[in-house]
Amino acid sequence: MTALTHLPKAVEDALERINPSTSRRDFLKSSGALVVSFGATAVTGAEAFASMAGGGGEALAQAAGPYPDPDFRQLDTWIVIHADNTATFYVGKTDCGQGTGTAFRQMMCDELDIAYDKTSLVMGRTDITPDQGGSGGSDAIERDGWPMRRVAAEARRVLLELGAERLGVPVVQLEVSDAVIAVRSDPARKVTYAELVSGQRFDVTLAGRDINATSGVADVKPVQDLRMVGQSVPRYDIPAKVDGSLTWAVDVKLPGMVHARNVRPPVAGAVLRGIDESSVADMPGFIRVVSRGNYVAVVCEREEQAIAAARRLQVEWERPAAAPFPASEELYAYMRSAAPTSGGDPDDVGDPEAAFAGAARIIEAEYEFPFQGHTAIGPAHALADPSAGQMTIYSNDMKAYGMRNGVAEFLGMPREQVRVVWMEGPQAYGRTAADDAGFEAAFLAQEIGRPVRMQWTRNEETAWDTKGPAYTFRLRGGLDAQDKLVALEYDARSADHNHVGYNEPDTVLIAQLMGRRRATPARGGAATPSDMYAIPNRRTTTQVVALPMIWETPLRTGNLRDPNGPQVTFAAESFIDELAAAAGADPVQFRLNLLAGSPEDDAFRRARSIAVVRAAAEAYGWEPRPSPKPRDAGTTPTQRGTGTNVIGRGTSTARTELGSGPILTGRGIAYTYRSRTIVAEIAEVEVNRETGHVWVKRLVCAHDCGLVINPEGLRRTIECGMLHSLSRALWEEVQFDTEKVTSVDWLSHPSLRHSDTPETIDVVLVNGDPNPDRSDLAPYGAGEAICKPLIAAVANAIYDATGVRIRRPPFRDERVLAALDAAGSPQSGPER
Amino acid sequence: MMSNVTLRVNGATHTLDIDPSTRLLYVLRNDLGLRGPRFGCGLGQCGACTVIIDGVATRSCVTTASRVSGEITTLEGLARNGTLDPLQQAWIDEQVPQCGFCQNGQIMTAKALLDRNPNPTDAEIREAMDRALCRCMTYYRVQAAIKRVTRGAEEVGR
């Protein structure tokens, strides 16, 4: 079984025969073969590769380590040209399923001037790809694409110079097409890239104080000259994911490999008092129980044996003296009353106190947001190989380099003896930035001295993965006599004390269970919404509160796809809608008015924001009117509910006349940005007023992330990202009693399903740049911005449909029904 | 404890010396080296482990290997003579997967659906697919890919 991803199948097979842990680059280096000669075999197939395996013995030795960091200042680290005039790119990123790998190839092909299908890509191998940090922060293309483009441009420049020398004409008289350099006036005079670098490496040293700044001398191309960029190239990884041929991290098998399962404390904070190893010692395949501190694992020869042994092992635990956290239903009261652990001083713009004092009306609302889990479809897993005194970890870790460093420190090994081989795995969205299983597999492999595969169970993953932090919010808005928003107060608290998620050796769960903890908890934060509207007077307060138990808790917080964005945008954009309703204004127009801006605003972002909000409204067919929606014409008003959306002084009671049928329809919009990416989303809902069930029938997204590399790939990311947040809006909530998480599988922790899927999703890709034809149009991130406004859009649509404002997700049937009941909805009203 | 268990998988017959209570998923993955069915929950709730046994989409993580007497088809067994099943091709044409980890369950569940009902309504698709979970939320494109097979790309209109 091979550890390589995205290599030609024939090469994989050949590698597999030689050594499960070798690699093309290892082989290349150790065999002494020149770049081009190795490359030829990579393309021509297994037989040629096998014939080269005379150097295989050296390859084996080399593959066993050490694994020094590839030098990002060497062009050869990034690009290899093969003898058949194809190329392989090596980049320090991982693809979490959004097709970034395909996009990297498109960008690098354009700069190098080579056809897409003549290239391949290697990602996330700490020993053979430069450290670009792996995935996170939606920065794959926005930030890390730049050094990729620049090194590819530099390779092209170097090749052109070699070509000029070979052809005997100045560079300016040459042209390049598909890796062939020709004299412009005499195209018959030509030379291929492979012919130029045959027998030599680039051996070009690049500049750059860090990897993000890596650059040669060449400039990247103007946007107008890009050919592959902007094409919807099909993702190269999809066929192998559809026909079953891809080797995932879960598929790697090594000789002598054994299987491990964890045994978790039954309640958070329980202390290990004893293990009765005799309870499993006679089980078939049993190898060992390994424990340290409160960490316990069972290792067996076969997987089903490890499962059975972990179930049967008798372990004595002692409950902690104090409850580790409040029950989930008490969480928000706890968060509001707890002493904050950080933050607290308000940040003022203008004179909010005076503005509120002078306001004609003040609208106020409180919101809550639960802990939500990553709950990956495949629980955490990794395989660690301790052979020859090295440690190789096969993992879907999105930040492979961070894990390499963390594991080395955790195990007390030199970094050069540890490598992480990133392979495809279940969605990450932040989970594998705190890659517990990789650390556990490595620890157990070191203890056992054999390759160990760690696999978490469903219940373990759903209970113990990292969580997106819970929030409470209080918002106040002041409207003047003309219903203009003149003052806004935003007060947020997050339960985000000790935020983990960067694969540190003292924050992963195994470390915490072993009692290995950093001196101070990792700093969390309470975020603010994107500062998008022109509101002259503002007061912003953010605070963090700790739950009683800080360490080794199943409620440890981590990076869940835009770690705070969905929470804070839910509150902020729900409240803007409440203000619009109070003002009797159309929600789109109310936002556009707020975007009209003031001179000191960021004109670039404002112009693009206005374009995006308008594009969403147009794509939806938005007809201006205030929310909530008036009752359907021709039906008898059965009820006049009083919206519960307004507290505080002033009026602004939303008078709602609900339609007479069981299904109420409405639409809601929310808008925000993330970094430089602007997004507006509209949800159209059907609310069943007898069951409380919400179906989002249609979604519209207008999205501006600047230069689009792969439009169809981007559309998929947008669609799925919106639905990810729709799942968080409708279903997801971590539930717990005072000592353990109780939502532990797909029944107790439901997720979005096929039946919840909208009938229609419309995506509009906007380029609202004030100068849309600029030659240096930049790409911005697209992995997370879409997740931010969706929950608010749904809440606003529910309000539009029903006149009832729901201020805490998820909008499950029972919560919606209860809110409808509380508002005097028809099913409990006197008319029925 | 161990005994011979015979399984027919993708047209081949295998006799294995295993604990007969072993769940089918682990036999397929660890003994037969198949990569299509994957562990997602071990509880029969998510569908990542789905195989087709005598035409029925079956969750191999809760199926006891020794009790299976029928013909087992896995994702690897859908292609015929090197040609992908139309559903697999539709998955590529529609660019369905994100991470792709659950897609075995999506495709195998859809395959069993179309084998018994070649022209399902939207409602029937949603109902049949409802317990095949995806955490990247590719549902919209999964449904589009199924309709691409049953009604053609033009009808799907995306």
Image (cartoon, coloured by chain):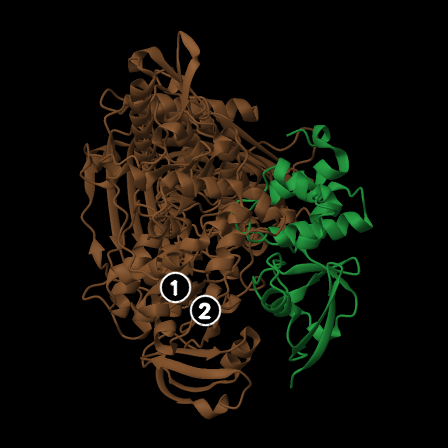
Chain colours: A brown, B green
Tag 2–tag 1 contact (CB < 8 Å): yes
Q: As shown in the figure, which amino acid type bears the numbered disc 1?
A: Gly
> Does A74 sit above or below residue A226?
below
Marks 2 and 1 sit apart, C-alpha to C-alpha, by 8 Å
> Does B95 sit above or below residue A817?
above
The x, y position of residue A443, in whole percent, is: 35, 71
> Does A811 sit above or below residue A382?
above
Q: As shown in the figure, which amino acid type bears the numbered disc 2?
A: Met
- Residue extending farthest to the top is A185
Camera-side residue: A777 or A760?
A: A777
The x, y position of residue A185, in whole percent, is: 40, 7
The secondary structure type at the circle numbered 1 is helix
Camera-side residue: A246 or A338?
A: A246
Q: Which mark is residue A454?
A: 2
Residue A165 sits in quarter: top left
Camera-side residue: A511 or A625?
A: A511
The subunit letter for the residue under badge 2 reads A
Other-residue count near label 2 (Cα within 10 Å), few / some / many at <14 / 14–19 / ≥20: many
Tell me what residue is drawn at x 35 percent, y 84 percent. A272
Q: Which mark is residue A620?
A: none
The secondary structure type at the circle numbered 2 is strand
Tell me what residue is drawn at x 67 percent, y 40 percent. B89
Q: Which mark is residue A438?
A: 1
Image position of A546 (left or right of A274): left
The subunit letter for the residue under badge 1 reads A
- Residue A583 showing in the rendered view: no
Camera-side residue: A104 or A156?
A: A156
